[in-house]
Amino acid sequence: QSALTQPPSASGSPGQSVTISCTGTSSDVGGYNYVSWYQQHPGKVPKLMIYEVIKRPSGVPDRFSGSKSGNTASLTVSGLQAEDEADYYCTSYAGSNYLVFGGGTKLTVL
Amino acid sequence: EVQLVESGGGLVQPGGSLRLSCAASGFTFSSYNMNWVRQAPGKGLEWVSYISSSSNTIYYADSVRGRFTISRDNAKNSLYLQMNSLRAEDTAVYYCARDKGLTLAAFDIWGQGTMVTVSS
């Protein structure tokens, strides 16, 4: 059960777009369309932002979008806002290992 | 209000045991698969264990398999994590999280977490 690979940090200015990658293997990201993304502000509980690669739960702004190509999934935040500054984690269903998390990416809004 | 409330955390010596509980309310607990996820201080999230709605299917992360046991009591709307042979590296905030229905491996409801500290 190796963790999915995310960049430790990402940044962008207000109004810009930023993309965070999440790389796994054919046993997780590449093998299933069950990639999720979570946002976690400091001291807060994680919040589901994207599931099944591209779907947004009710209440999540459409500035957040997901995609996948091969073994790499991506989260794009468009029109960056100050409140988007947080840690972001990807996860993937992994069959009999059920689920694996990425190491997390700290998004800074400059 | 849909809610998950964890309890049972605390300070325990290496090699000791602890039982965490998660009380669910505001939804039909017996219809949802559930999970435990942990987060060591200053570190990322780590999935720990999964249990299906009827307890028929259970999964564990390699790091806890053989030491932790997940269970649930649908009559009491409660989820449990029995943790034995605890190690310093088990120190973390432990969250219970609900699997979002009609999909896999997406956690839509989280508890506020309970802190477990393993130290002598």
Image (cartoon, rainbow, N blue to C red):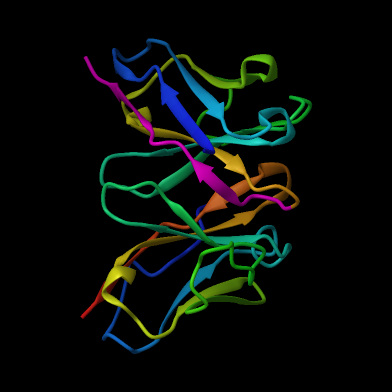
Residue A9 picture location, percent across and down: 31, 70
Q: Quadrant of residue B78?
A: top right
Per the rendered image, the range of residues in magenta is B103-120
Rendered-image quadrant of the C terminus of chain A: bottom left
- Give the side of residue B56 with respect to residue A105, left or right: right
Looking at the image, which residue is at 36% across and 22% down?
A: B87
Comparing A55 with B116, the one in front is A55
Q: Position of residue A88 (x, y in %)?
A: 40, 62
Residue B12 percent across, percent down from the top left: 30, 13
Determine which quarter of the picture holds residue A53.
bottom right
B28 vs A40: above or below: above
Q: Is residue A10 visible?
A: yes
> Is residue A61 depicted above or below A13 in this figure?
above
Where residue A62 sits: x, y (%)? 52, 77
Magenta stretch: residue B112 in it? yes
- Looking at the image, can residue A1 be seen? no
Residue at 21% across / 14% down in the picture?
Answer: B120
Q: Foreground residue, B105 or B76? A: B76
